[in-house]
Image: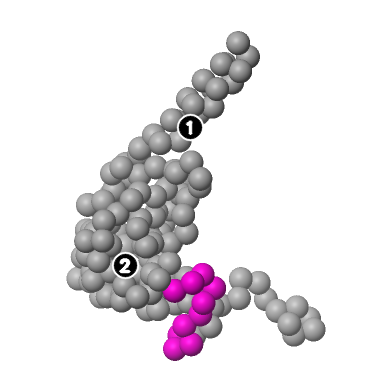
């Protein structure tokens, strides 16, 4: 009896993890910082280009959920700003889309066509999705430090 109750509780808790959510429209976005893992690829401030990317993200604002195994980590990340106010982020992985908005981290599967459409809109080569984590691009500036160096210079 106790095992049945425990099993039912586990099943119901896992099902609740797949509760799909929809996000609000992004609203005003003036700057998009495109990251390849932790390296800055580019900054997009051209109004038309930003509007095109925001439209693509807004069209995909439904069907997000937190996978049971946790949110996957995207290789390409778009940091979204209205002037200097951080509004959230949107990511692209090998077979998924990812978002961090409204205090949540969510993902959803994506087809090759959907991924390629986003990559084309942003202007990023699909090859960047297949580099290993921590594998830095020597043609990009090194990642910025999250913390200032220690007093001994390291």
Residue 54 x, y percent position in the rendering: 26, 60
Q: For this rendering, which residue is in front, 90 or 47? A: 90
Which circle's residue, 1 or 2, is located before the other in the chain? 1
Q: Is residue 154 visible?
A: yes
Q: Nearer the viewer, mark 1 or mark 2?
A: 1
Q: Is residue 47 visible?
A: no
Q: Quarter of the image containing the N terminus?
A: top right
Q: For this rendering, which residue is in front, 26 or 75? A: 75
Say which residue appears at 79% left-offset and 84% top-offset.
152
Count of numbered marks: 2
Q: For this rendering, which residue is in front, 13 or 103? A: 13
Determine if the magenta segment contains residue 99. Answer: no
Residue 96 x, y percent position in the rendering: 35, 56
Say which residue appears at 51% left-offset and 70% top-offset.
133
Residue 107 x, y percent position in the rendering: 39, 50
Q: Is residue 22 left or right of residue 103?
A: left
Pointers 1 and 2 in contact (C-beta within 8 Å): no
Q: Is residue 133 left or right of residue 130?
A: right
Q: Which mark is residue 90?
A: none
Residue receiving disc 1: 14
Determine if the magenta segment contains residue 132. Answer: yes
Q: Is residue 82 left or right of residue 16?
A: left
User: Is 7 rendered above or below residue 34?
Assistant: above
Residue receiving disc 2: 30
* Prevalent SS, magenta region: loop
Determine the residue located farthest toward the right in the rendered image: 152
Around disc 2, counting alpha carbons within 10 Å, would you say few (fewer than 14), some (14 to 19), or many (20 or more)?
Answer: some
Determine the residue located farthest toward the bottom in the rendered image: 139
Mark 2 residue element:
loop
User: Is 7 rendered above or below residue 49?
Assistant: above
From which residue to which does the magenta span run? 131-140
User: Is 14 rendered above or below residue 80?
Assistant: above
């Amino acid at each position: 009896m106790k095992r049945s109750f425990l099993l039912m509780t586990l099943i119901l808790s896992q099902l609740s993890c797949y509760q799909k959510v929809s996000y609000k429209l992004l609203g005003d976005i003036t700057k998009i910082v495109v990251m390849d893992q932790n390296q800055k690829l580019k900054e997009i401030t051209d109004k038309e280009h930003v509007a095109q990317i925001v439209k693509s993200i807004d069209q995909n604002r439904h069907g997000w959920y937190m996978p049971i195994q946790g949110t996957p980590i995207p290789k390409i990340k778009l940091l979204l700003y209205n002037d200097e106010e951080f509004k959230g982020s949107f990511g692209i992985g090998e077979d998924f889309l990812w978002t961090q908005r409204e205090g949540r981290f969510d993902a959803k599967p994506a087809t090759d066509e959907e991924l390629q459409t986003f990559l084309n809109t942003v202007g990023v080569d699909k090859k960047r999705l297949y580099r290993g984590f921590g594998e830095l691009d020597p043609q990009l500036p090194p990642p910025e430090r999250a913390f200032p160096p220690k007093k001994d210079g390291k």
